[in-house]
Image (cartoon, rainbow, N blue to C red):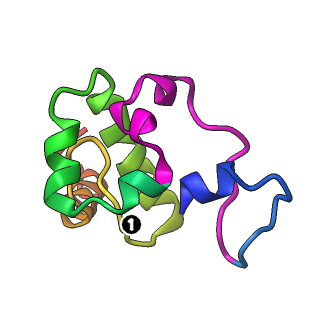
Amino acid sequence: MIRALWNNPARIVIEDTPVIAAPPEWMTDALCAQIGGYGWDTLSTEQQVEACQPCPVKAECGRFGVEHLMVTEKAGTTVYGGMTPAEIAERARAQRRGEVE
């Protein structure tokens, strides 16, 4: 979803979807950026998690996934920082409870 908005030259906005003006700078170093949005989205969750393991920006990406979920309060459908959508949701809940930073 987020990648689709960045690659949206007409800036068409889906109702209730937060718009991110530009991707974070670290994202250009992400291994998934080399695969591309469509290519990434065709991978299974397990393949996405596996592809994340050697990524140099895995930690930043994981934080981004959790922060995005906490802002939008909507569950994601893709992997961030090697975490599945369920793991991201659990990390966000744990942060809200003050159990992790």
Give the quadrant of the C terminus.
Answer: top left
Q: Residues within 10 Å of mark 1 (few under 14, many from 20)?
A: some
Q: Is residue 72 above or below residue 5?
A: below
Residue 84, percent from left and from top: 21, 59
The residue depicted at 20 percent of the width and 61 percent of the height is: 45
Start and end of the magenta stretch? 16-37
Do we see residue 99 in this rendering? no
The residue depicted at 37 percent of the width and 39 percent of the height is: 32
The residue at the far right in this view is 10
Describe residue 91's horizontal placement relative to residue 2 as left or right. Answer: left
Q: SS for tag 1?
A: loop
The residue depicted at 38 percent of the width and 66 percent of the height is: 76
Pointer 1 residue: 76
Do we see residue 43 in this rendering? yes
The residue at the far bottom in this view is 15
Residue 94, percent from left and from top: 20, 56
Q: Is residue 15 above or below residue 40?
A: below
Describe residue 24's horizontal placement relative to residue 76 as left or right. Answer: right
Describe residue 61's horizontal placement relative to residue 89 as left or right. Answer: right
The kind of residue tagged 1 is: Gly
Quadrant of residue 17 within the rendered picture:
bottom right
